[in-house]
Image (cartoon, rainbow, N blue to C red):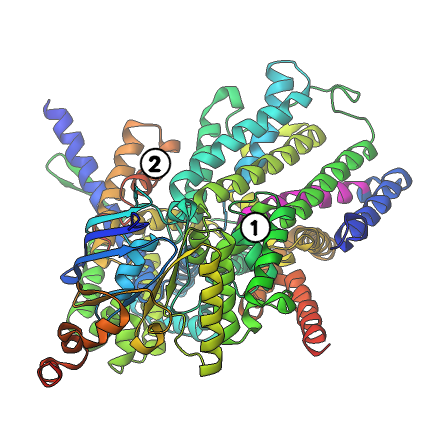
Amino acid sequence: MKTIARDRNVLTLIGLLVIGVFAAFGVRDVVVLDLLFTLLIYAVLGQSWNWISGYGGNISFGHAIFFGCGAYAAAIATARFGISPWFAFPLGAAVAAVLALAVGYPTFALRGHYFSIATIAVGALVETFVKTQPYLGRANGFELPIANGFAALQFTEKWPYVLLALALFAIAQAATIGLERSRLGYYLRALRANYGAAASVGIDERRWKLIAFAGSAVLASAAGVLYAQYTLFVDPSSTLALPISIDIALVGVVGGIGTVWGPPVGALVYVFLAKAVALKLGGAGKGYDLVIYGALIVAIAAVRPSGIVGAAIEALRRRRAVREAGG
Amino acid sequence: MEQTIDVFAQLLVSGLLAGLLFALVAVGLTLVYGVMDVVNFAHGEFLMLAMYAAFGLALLGLQPLVALPLVVIAMFFFGIVVYRLFIRRLLAGPPEATVFGTFGLLVLLQGLAQALFTSDFFSIPNRPFAQTLHFGSVSVGAAAIVEGIGALVLTGALFAFVEYTETGRALRAVSEDRIAATLMGIDVGRMNAVAFGIGAACVGAAGTLLMLSYPVYPRVGADFALTAFVVVALGGFGSVQGALVGALLVGVLEVFGGFYLAPEIKMVPVYLAYLVVVLVRPQGLLGRR
Amino acid sequence: MSEPILRVRGLTKQFGSLRALDGVDLDVTAGALTGLIGPNGAGKSTAFGCIAGALKPSGGSILFAGTEIAGMAYHRVAHLGIGRTYQVVQTFADMTVLEATTTGALMRHPRVVDATAVAEEILSFVGLADKRRQLGRALTIADKKRLEVARALAIEPQLLLLDEVMAGLTPRESQAAVVLLRAILARGITILMVEHVMEVLMPIADHVVVIAAGRTIFTGDARAAVRDPAVIEAYLGPRAAALHG
């Protein structure tokens, strides 16, 4: 049996973290640091989406609401209650988990696309709700008060944010590596493979998917808290709107669903393409990046639904199986 | 008291007319699902495409009602092409493949629209049927009536097609039992393509009619798509009659909601209705599965 | 005689206008192998599905170890101690043999480490240990069936339901299967087997239940079953019964 220390995934993660720490301390260019931060946040969001949509097989088009939970929790904590935004982590997580349970409970018991459509409907409901609440800043949103220091989770420089994002990324990846090896991981795979046979070995689909979904929501919420503390501004269009949900799903699909490294690869592709398009075409480029993502997803879905990383893993698996069968 | 009845009648008429249009949008979606078990998440974007097409034709001097047959035919063939090139491949993969695939199509089409036409809102110049008609105490825009009647006629034509023609019967057969249909000699692949084409054609008609009173912009599809999903779920996935009933209900709900609640939250009752359906009767009002 | 571990009374199942089961009675004795057979369309698979929890019966009672399980949720039936295989193998295609079996073992052993150990033992028991890293989709039919048995055994059931497990096996494979079934019985697990062909059950079944047209028409031992006129009639028609009797 492979020990943790020799696991390829863990080693890759540690390697990336080392690089990341060096980058955070070494890079002075603000634009690059900003890119890094965005990249890491999207990687975490994509990974959270991956738990329920990739491993679970229930595609969510409303993940932005969990991201928004964290962001608004941070904003409310600091701007309305004057308490440390660190409280936003558990607060946002709690609300996000409750939302996830509410959406998942009726829909995971049904076959078909009810879940996916429900995520769109609830996403629209939450966005509309926030837009009508003056307490939540309505459609215009509101700003977070300026502060400084670790306790206030605000810094004048960018590199501490990148470090924190890196930490969150590490947690997300480690949790996903753990997920794959856990009972939940096995059960999700079995459910995706054959839900009837899974039930015949005692797997309660709804229970396990709810766990995965709630975990996914909490992770996305944490990313939202960091994001709010970074931009110091929250509004529905940047945290709750359908396009945000679509972006999150995009990152998850392009990289490879149901794999540990899919979302980070997807985030890389996403951020890289967005930047490249913006550089080449400026404002007029809006839409071209979507065309490329869309074309990528269409191609991947038609040829190999498991995405970039998934394709690589399948190729590796086949080679190993051939070796083992012949040896 | 008389005033409330007047208001009620007004809202009801507006709601039903809107509902008829939703029906035309939703009927294509539910037909595709019934025949091949695919929810086309890019359905809204097909609507958007049709609207841009109608707008383009209007700029060339073709009024929407005149352009209607052209857009419908073009969208029909567009649907067939999309099926043959793409959807067919998705059907061979795992069930999530159709969700991802149509999602990718959604992103691609929206991106194309944004890149080619920018995010600006475009309305048809010199809109016909701009007058308001009065029937007793009820006032309705002429455009709304034309849209509603047009939608009713086309939806009725679709019903007749599905009910009385041989292709329609074949579609129903595939919808009910794919394997049995194959055994009866029906070419399921061809039926899939036809269904997808019809779905696109319906949305093409709806989009053209919509241009009588709506602007087109890249995200317009997303707004209507969710309503279409709710209608289909309410009526029952796969049931064409259910889509009509569901659409009328949703239309009325939306109009009443817009009046009695604030206009920004007029869609809330509709979304809540979806969640209620999921909780109480997932198969919808007229659904089988 | 000890109390039967499974007692089915008056089981009915209606599919729309089709009455697939019209009163099936069935007793399964603990520790023994009971065969459930009948001609095509008799309702064997339907009855099987109801007992396993995959189908909800329209009426009747299914008592398993004293608990009423008719209509119980599918996964809960597994938790109570009933394992099953499928007539058309439902393999976890992209999981390895070991992973699939571990999935089953996780029901009673929540820790993956423990479950894997249990799975390894079961794979040795059924003879798939050397194929543990092969993907489900890459196995032969006989091995897929073996894996299905392993997966069902992994939940440590008291009752194992086998759905036409002998179908499609070569004579040698069938012999190996019989050996395995005897080994399972030796572990104290009760077996209820659905089979289409009588000869297969003769050497191993302690007890046989014959159903036709949704009803039980015979219970007793296998040798008596082949001589019973009602059974002959169900399989071969009324004239054959007259000839034989």
Q: Nearer the viewer, residue A295 or B213?
A: A295
The residue that label 1 is drawn on is A249
**What residue sits 65% from the left and 21% below the top?**
A87
**What residue sits 10% from the left and 86% below the top?**
C243
Side of B92 where C71 appears, left or right: left
Q: Chain of mark 1?
A: A
The correct choice, above or below, for A193 with respect to B123 in the image is below
Q: Residue furthest right?
A: A26
Q: Nearer the viewer, residue C115 or A301?
A: C115
What type is the residue that disc 2 sits on? Leu
Q: How many marks?
A: 2
Q: Position of residue A199 (x, y in %)?
A: 43, 52
The residue that label 2 is drawn on is B272
Query: Which residues are the magenta region?
Result: A33-55
Q: CA distance from mark 2 to mark 1?
A: 24 Å
In this rendering, does residue C178 appear at all? Answer: yes
**What residue sits 57% from the left and 38% below the top?**
A215
Q: Position of residue A157 (x, y in %)?
A: 83, 30
Q: Circle 1 — which element? A: helix
Q: Circle 2 — which element? A: helix
